[in-house]
Image (cartoon, rainbow, N blue to C red):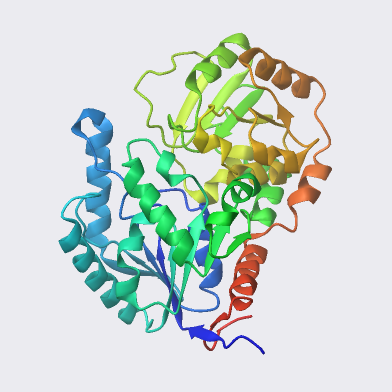
Amino acid sequence: MATPQKHFDGIICFGGEDWWYHNRGHYDMQMMRELSRVVPVLYVNSIGMRVPRVGEGSMFAKRIARKLKSLKRGLVKVRDNFFVASPLVAPAGMGAGLNRLALAIQVRACARRAGIRRPLVWIACPPGAEVVDKLNPVGLVYQRTDRFEDFSGVNRDRIKGFDTYLKDRADLTLYCSSWLMEQEQAECRSAEFIDHGCDYEAFAAAGQDPASEPEDVKPIGRPRIGFIGGIDKHTFDPDLFVEVARSLPEAQFVMVGGCSLPENWVDLPNTHLLGRRQYEEVPGYMAACDVLIMPWNRTDWIQACNPVKLKEYLAIGRPVVSTPFPELARYEGLVEVADTAAGFSDAISRVLASPPDPAPGRTRVEQETWTAKGKAALAALSGRGIEPMNPSAA
């Protein structure tokens, strides 16, 4: 007997990031962009997993300032079928009962304005679990793209509790790390591996177009070694990076992304911290480099990661050097892997001296588009008896 289908008329996504502040290449943002082609989407800016601490210094002030800016925007329609909301909530764990009620009321009101009455709820920020039942969802998706409980500064027991609840409650738990899924699949009611996508055409085109080089990179000499992404202590290895940059004084290290490390964590003449850039600008910065790197640390977070930048790096067509993590096994022969600073420096020197053919890397990710991932997610839901109502696109 066929499984009766349940139909949703829109998606409420509790995002892991802030639409107005973070790079929009993240899994939840990209998936919602694709799914908004089918049904209305309400993206709820991150409601937070940790309480900001005054001891964070300047980062405390920055976090408070950007959250206030987001709150001022309220509900915004950013494109057809795609709405972004910034609800007012107390910091994580404070005033829990009142917080849940206030959050649910705000989200329901925003959903109605977006035309959503029968939502599929998509959770990329685990505290969203507290209001799932108040939203009467047709279905529930849990995006398990990281070990959220290992994030710096969170209440591990609290976040792990949300994780356990969501795995048991969700109609579909999505993994982008095959290693993490192997570790946790038995904990889930229903799990599926659908990893990151890539805006392949944009990145491949930039990689083959010299005119894509940003103006602020042009004065920087070559060879250029690039890192594009968040420079954060729970992912990035500053000690390894500094040792590598010091050992290659003839190379210029171009860093593009927000940084939460202490000020003056690196003070070398061949290192250039350019700060955050809009997602649409990222391909040009990657393409302006001769080698692209991923100098990760050795945390449990990295063990379970599958960074979206890997596919973007390969689409750009530059050599890639990384510290090891399990998901690289799926890209054997396409990435230089080194677990020490000396080995990392040697790998950079080796690919500079003899750049590999970019074609195999591009071929590997050419079909791994976000459009394909969105369709895969809809197919996974359909197989579990959940489908969009009157979809606006196939």
| Extreme residue toward the front, this view | 186
Quadrant holding the N terminus: bottom right
Residue in the image at 54% along x and 71% along y: 35
Quadrant holding the C terminus: bottom right
Visible residue check, residue 228: no
Residue in the image at 43% along x and 29% along y: 233
Visible residue check, residue 258: yes
328, above or below 323, in the image: below
User: Could you tell me residue 154's position as x and y percent?
Assistant: 33, 41
The image quadrant of residue 264 is top left
58, above or below 202, in the image: above
Q: Viewer-proximal residue, 381 or 19?
A: 381
User: Could you tell me residue 316's position as x and y percent?
Assistant: 69, 43
Q: Viewer-proximal residue, 158 or 342?
A: 158
Residue in the image at 67% along x and 65% along y: 372
166, above or below 51, in the image: below
Q: Is residue 205 left or right of residue 102?
A: right
User: Could you tell me residue 314's position as x and y percent?
Assistant: 71, 42
